[in-house]
């Protein structure tokens, strides 16, 4: 980062116990809605958008961006104010406003399509003819551009 | 894995795919080779083919989080022909809807070489009644607890976009996001304000790089100043923005770090960066080669190399 060190607090540990898929899905929906919406900043809190203090990477709980293909969930950063020591109050208040997520999603196409993974997709396009179609399936075409589902 | 010997990988190696030429369902195997993990399949009619799906660290075998299936409770389709021919969703599906996407127009004000959405003017936009019925269907199928993304085409070409957003909010959807190239947000100073007033929560902004060279290569047009103006207008109206780069090998994969830094400089208005490696829909003269693809671990590696964020801190979706 231009201005400070990154202090990661958690890591991915494969092979831990089975998580509840329903809870995961709800957390995904809630996290996306919270993190990607407008920051809860007051006018005067937004005067210093270019911080030069420390940045702290903070795992924000079970933060998930779901997958039609392969993806990773957002990780979140909290950036602190310019030149100020990071105290707990400030950290918590900036956690609300200055969290930053990084995520990735690899869409599947007809070449790399893995049907085992498609069944776990939770981004669905509403077909004009009715029904919710997994995003990658809705956009999938054969090599000549003919669609599996899309009509137009 | 650095041995030359090919072998099928230990985690469930077997899966299924489709033939790119006749869409016949084929059995497929994930095979680990020196260059990475490949999806290998063979069509009785069109022959064998393989595509890179995973290159480098972290190991693909570790990239899972065990979870119980959490399919939708309401199914619009029965299992008849087998996946993926029963979409709608069918009872075989293992995840409920997190984000429902509505394509509210086919028109677009930018005609990009990499775009997979249609952008013809031939198809008329669905009217407000139709869109109301769509929202209603989503509410019925999902119980309403999902996020909405308005997409296209380019949704901002519709003058009634604020009404469409307000309608969704009135119908009880908690989070509505618009997927946009940002042209109109940049050009009309108060457009962001009208969307915000209508209840828009977030702007999913196409943002492929931090200089015009990348925009020219991908979209055929200088867009950097436009993107920055769009973000500034969102800031004036306190609309959250997510930067969404389409990553194409050799075009902008060297700007992963710059895009993150740009996002952080514009935090908190910019809420995050959501990378989408290029995928291949539509008509192509020849099959995309392995060099035309960026796999997930390469994005993680790019982040590590270009920002210093350690790869170990990214997690698979739950
Ligand atoms: S809804 Fe899901 S499980 Fe059913 S056919 Fe479509 S992708 Fe397969």
Image: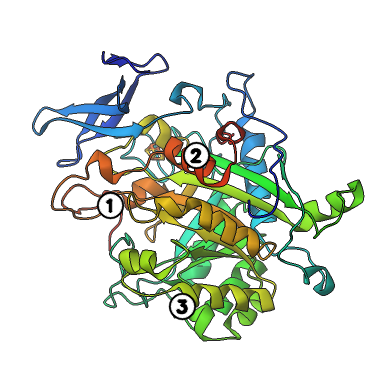
Of B75 and A14, which appears nearest the observer? Answer: A14
Can residue B153 be seen here? The reply is no
Q: Name above or below for residue B65 compared with residue B282.
A: above
Q: What residue is rendered at 44% in x and 43% in y?
A: B89
Asked where in the image residue B26 lies, by quadrant, the reply is top left
**Mark 1 highlights which residue?**
B281
Q: Position of residue A50 (x, y in %)?
A: 71, 65
Label drawn at residue A96: none
Is tag 1's residue or tag 2's residue first in the polypeptide sequence?
1
Confirm if mark 1 falls within 8 A of ligand 1.
no
Q: Residues within 10 Å of mark 1 (few under 14, many from 20)?
A: many
Q: CA distance from mark 3 to mark 1?
A: 24 Å
**Mark 2 highlights which residue?**
B300
- Chain of the residue where label 2 is placed in the rendered structure: B
Is tag 3's residue or tag 2's residue first in the polypeptide sequence?
3
- Chain of the residue where label 1 is placed in the rendered structure: B
Label 2: which secondary element: helix
Is tag 3's residue or tag 1's residue first in the polypeptide sequence?
3
Label drawn at residue B183: 3
* Left or right relative to B63: residue A142: left
- Chain of the residue where label 3 is placed in the rendered structure: B
Decide: marks 3, 2 in contact (CB < 8 A)? no
């Amino acid at each position: 980062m231009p201005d400070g060190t990154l202090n990661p607090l958690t890591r991915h540990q494969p092979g831990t116990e089975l998580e509840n898929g329903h809870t995961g899905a709800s957390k995904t929906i809630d996290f996306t809605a919270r993190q990607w919406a407008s920051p809860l900043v007051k006018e005067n809190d937004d005067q210093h958008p270019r911080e030069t203090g420390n940045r702290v990477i903070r795992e924000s709980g079970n933060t998930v961006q779901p997958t039609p293909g392969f993806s990773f969930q957002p990780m979140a950063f909290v950036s602190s104010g310019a030149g100020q020591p990071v105290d707990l109050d400030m950290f918590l208040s900036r956690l609300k406003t200055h969290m930053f997520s990084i995520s990735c999603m690899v869409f599947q196409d007809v070449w790399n399509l893995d049907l085992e993974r498609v069944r776990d997709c939770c981004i669905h396009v509403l077909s004009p003819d009715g029904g919710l179609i997994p995003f990658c399936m809705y956009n999938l075409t054969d090599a000549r551009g003919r669609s599996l589902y899309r009509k137009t | 894995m650095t041995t030359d010997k090919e072998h099928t990988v230990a985690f469930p190696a077997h899966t299924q795919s489709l033939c790119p030429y006749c869409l016949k369902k084929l059995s497929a195997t994930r095979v680990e080779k020196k260059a990475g993990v490949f999806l290998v399949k063979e069509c009785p009619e069109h022959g064998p083919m393989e595509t890179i799906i995973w290159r480098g660290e972290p190991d693909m075998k570790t990239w899972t989080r065990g979870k119980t299936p959490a399919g939708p409770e309401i199914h619009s389709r029965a299992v008849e022909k087998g996946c993926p021919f029963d979409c709608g969703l069918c009872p075989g599906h293992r995840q409920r809807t997190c984000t429902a996407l509505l394509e509210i127009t086919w028109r677009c004000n930018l005609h990009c070489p990499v775009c997979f959405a249609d952008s013809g003017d031939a198809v008329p936009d669905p009217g407000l009644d139709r869109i109301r019925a769509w929202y209603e269907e989503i509410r019925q199928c999902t119980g309403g607890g999902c996020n909405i993304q308005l997409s296209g085409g380019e949704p901002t070409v519709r003058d009634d976009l604020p009404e469409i957003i307000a309608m969704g909010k009135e119908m009880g959807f908690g989070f509505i996001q618009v997927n946009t190239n940002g042209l109109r947000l940049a050009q009309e100073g108060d457009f962001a304000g009208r969307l915000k007033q209508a209840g828009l929560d977030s702007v999913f902004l196409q943002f492929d790089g931090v200089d015009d060279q990348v925009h020219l290569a991908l979209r055929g047009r200088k867009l950097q100043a436009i993107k920055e103006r769009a973000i500034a207008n969102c800031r004036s109206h306190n609309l959250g923005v997510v930067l969404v780069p389409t990553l194409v090998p050799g075009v902008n994969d060297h700007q992963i770090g710059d895009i993150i830094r740009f996002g952080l400089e514009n935090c908190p208005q910019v809420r995050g960066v959501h990378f989408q490696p290029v995928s291949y829909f539509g008509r192509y003269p020849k099959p995309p080669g392995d060099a035309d693809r960026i796999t997930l671990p390469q994005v993680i590696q790019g982040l590590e190399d270009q920002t210093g964020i350690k790869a170990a801190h990214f997690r698979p979706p739950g």
